[in-house]
Image (tube, grey):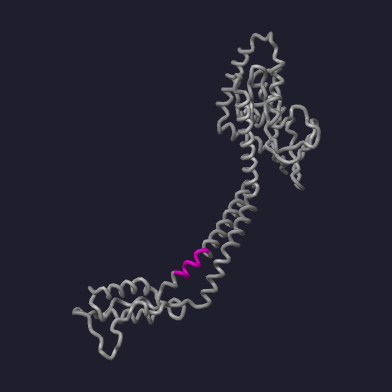
């Protein structure tokens, strides 16, 4: 039932958007139809052109000039600013085959110049309608933009959040590559890893932003490309972002990254040497004491460097453990394809839906 209602709502949004776009196109094309109407001569001028054509042989330049204007501007002649319903006259009934007929001497002008033909005029009502239609195009486009924004606001917000998250991950990855270029390391992005939980017969999946594998530890990074003021503590379930007067609450990223660390530890079979790091952008400013394992991008490299100094000099199996961990993470990276991401997204949506009790 919910699926049917959802489909009906999506179809209704599409129909509303289509109707508004058709209206805009109609209003926008109306001025062009008026301009096409302006190019047509009146019935009287078309009759004069046709009458003069009868006095010239079809091979003469004057006849060709009159015929071209007749074909162009007498297809739908107008009368008093309104399109005529009279069909286009047939081709001249009688055409002289001899040389052009000379006008009687009592007529001072034998050939009427083209410029003497008065152009047709559009009625004031048509001019007013054209002006109004041009003025209405801009507000209608603004209205369409507002309607589209309201209808697709949730999707736009989701895509914007995904885009910001990807930009933050790329920026942090670039920072790590530049700062660790002299180190032997591996960097993995957007790993889809199973957890111990079971969802509908399949292991629950989680997505890890970045995993940095080094000889002195494995760092699980959760990237938050946020700006503004941040309020939150290590044990608080909800943190808050404040930008001017707008306040937005979000889940404690330390709790969120804790599950990521469990998934990475399960994948690598580790019980130690795993470090959780939450990285905020430099545009975010903490207004509460900075929790442990939370840094800005500018302090990430120094945070990692402190673990390099703590590396035990007596560990002989460091290279072997690094190689084994790299092989497992390489396999996990290959398995984090589009199908795994789709399954993770479906599970994520399922966990967010409130359970219903059937009667």
Left or right, residue 288 beside residue 11: right
- Give the overall secondary structure of the magenta segment: helix
Out of 328 and 181, give the one closest to the viewer: 181
**Quarter of the image holding residue 23?**
bottom right
Question: In the figure, 249 relative to 84: above or below?
Answer: above
Does 34 lie within the magenta span?
A: yes
For residue 186, what is the image quadrant? top right
Q: Can residue 272 be seen by looking at this rendering?
A: yes
Q: Nearer the viewer, residue 301 or 339?
A: 301
The percent coordinates of residue 147 (x first, y second) are: 62, 56
Q: Residue at x 37, y 73 (%)?
A: 73
Query: Is 244 situated above or below 40?
Result: above
Residue 202 appears in the figure: no
Left or right: where 56 falls relative to 32: left
The image shows residue 181, relative to residue 74, as above or below, that is above
Looking at the rendering, the stretch of residues picked out in magenta corresponds to: 28-35
Residue 97 percent location from the top left of the image: 19, 78
Relative to 245, 26 lies left or right: left
């Amino acid at each position: 039932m919910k699926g049917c209602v959802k489909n009906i709502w999506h179809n209704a949004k599409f129909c509303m958007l289509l109707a508004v776009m058709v209206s805009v196109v109609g209003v926008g094309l109306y001025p062009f139809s008026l301009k096409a109407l302006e190019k047509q001569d009146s019935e009287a001028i078309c009759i004069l052109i046709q009458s003069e054509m009868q006095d010239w042989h079809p091979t003469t330049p004057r006849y060709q000039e009159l015929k071209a204007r007749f074909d162009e501007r007498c297809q739908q002649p107008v009368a008093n600013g309104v399109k005529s319903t009279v069909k286009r006259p047939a081709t001249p009934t009688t055409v002289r085959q001899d040389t052009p007929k000379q006008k009687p001497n009592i007529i001072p002008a034998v050939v009427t110049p083209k410029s003497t033909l008065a152009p047709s005029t559009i009625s004031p009502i048509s001019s007013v309608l054209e002006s109004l239609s041009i003025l209405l195009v801009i507000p209608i486009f603004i209205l369409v933009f507002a309607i589209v924004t309201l209808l697709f606001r949730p999707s736009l917000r989701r895509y914007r959040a995904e885009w910001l998250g990807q930009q933050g991950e790329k920026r942090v990855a670039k920072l790590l590559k530049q700062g660790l270029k002299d180190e032997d390391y591996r960097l993995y992005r957007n790993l889809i890893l199973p957890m111990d939980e079971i969802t509908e017969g399949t292991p629950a999946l989680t997505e890890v932003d970045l995993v940095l594998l080094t000889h002195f530890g494995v760092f699980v990074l959760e990237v938050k490309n946020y700006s503004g003021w941040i309020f939150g503590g290590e044990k608080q379930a909800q943190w808050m972002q404040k930008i001017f007067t707008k306040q937005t609450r979000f889940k404690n990223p330390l709790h969120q990254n804790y599950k990521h660390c469990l998934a990475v530890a399960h994948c690598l079979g580790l019980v130690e040497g795993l470090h959780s790091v939450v990285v905020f952008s430099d545009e975010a400013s903490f207004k509460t004491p900075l929790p442990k394992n939370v840094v800005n991008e500018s302090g990430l490299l120094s945070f990692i460097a402190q673990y390099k100094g703590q590396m035990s000099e007596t560990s002989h199996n460091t290279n072997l453990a690094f190689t084994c961990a790299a092989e497992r993470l390489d396999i996990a990276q290959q398995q984090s394809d589009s199908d795994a991401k789709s399954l993770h997204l479906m599970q994520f949506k399922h966990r967010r839906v409130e359970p219903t009790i059937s009667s």
